[in-house]
Amino acid sequence: MAFTAKDVQTLRERTGCGMMDCKKALTETDGDMEKAIEVLREKGLAAAAKKAGRIAAEGVVYAYVDEAKKIGVVIEVNSETDFVAKNDSFIAFVDTCAKTIAEQNPATVEALLDCKAAGSNETVADMLREKILTIGENMKIRRFARYEGEVVTYIHGGGRIGVMVGFETDLADKAEFKDYAKDIAMQVAASAPTYLDKASVPSETIEKEKEILTVQAINEGKPANIAEKMVMGRIGKYYKEVCLLEQPFIKDGDLSVTQYTEKVAKELGGSIKVTGFVRYEKGEGLEKKEDNFADEVASMIK
């Protein structure tokens, strides 16, 4: 499999490794991007493979909660420019989409497009087409998630990152619980966990991680028996990086998120369980159109 200079650049962006190291890794793996990431990690050159490519598309991540019905929604809608993403008409459309999801519970984006938009006789698809015509930019509903029960949402950076966290608790009416829940949502936004807890991590993911860490340890010159112990220690560190409940709490690094949750529940005299979370980052993994401004100006004056 051949590779290009752009592939080298992509690998560099995903791993943070030097250009020559990325080129060597792609050569060694015959251009296979994922295998090249593994090679760089085994050599200790890449701390971890970033789970997404560079953030590229414009638009907004938006959250809506129906407090009465205890339904939460987080949605990402993309546009071509940041200017349009701040347009009141665009935001109103995104809000309508979120309310439609809360009310009608569509399973997919395609199903959402077929729904009658909340508060309207138009379908979401018709409304989207109308917005594209009036605003003058392509727009796309990319993804959404919907939770029922006790939920909290958090939007960071004016719609750059959106988080929704679900809970089971008998403390929902307490102000202290709401403060705690916001802390957990901010934790998700800041620390970007991949999984809820250890049990959520697929066994094949752990086995692959063990393979990579074992090769790293052996490359460091460690005997097999020492390497095995090192790997188990590093797997523990891996869990603390990727599992929300294992992560150090951002406001008190001496506590894990689990310990902080138990502490708050005990202080309030009830129970709290984090049941799930969603974290969307605007444009995550999407390629952005790259314009050459000089060429654009030149073309305008021809």
Image (cartoon, grey):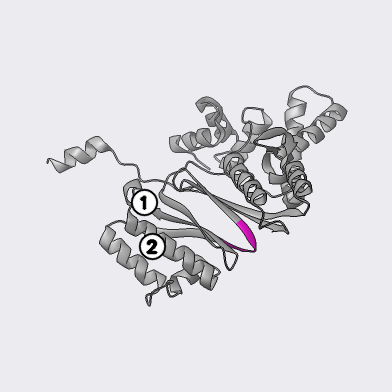
Give 35 or 299, whichever is nearer the viewer.
299
- Res. 93 mark: 2
- Lower sequence index among marks 2 and 1: 1
In the image, is residue 171 above or below residue 198?
A: below
- Res. 85 mark: 1
Give 87 or 168, whichever is nearer the viewer.
168
Residue in the picture at 52% in, 71% down: 103
Q: On the image, which quarter does residue 250 sit in?
A: top right
- Tell me the amino acid under the disc marked 2: Phe
Tell me if 172 is positioned left or right of 19 in this view: right
Q: On the image, which quarter does residue 152 sit in?
A: bottom right
Helix, strand or loop for disc 2: helix
Cα separation between marks 2 and 1: 11 Å
Q: Position of residue 153 (x, y in %)?
A: 56, 53
| Boundaries of the magenta span | 146-151
Whether residue 263 is visible to the viewer of this picture, yes or no, is yes
In the image, is residue 163 above or below residue 46?
A: below
- Disc 2, disc 1: CB below 8 Å? no
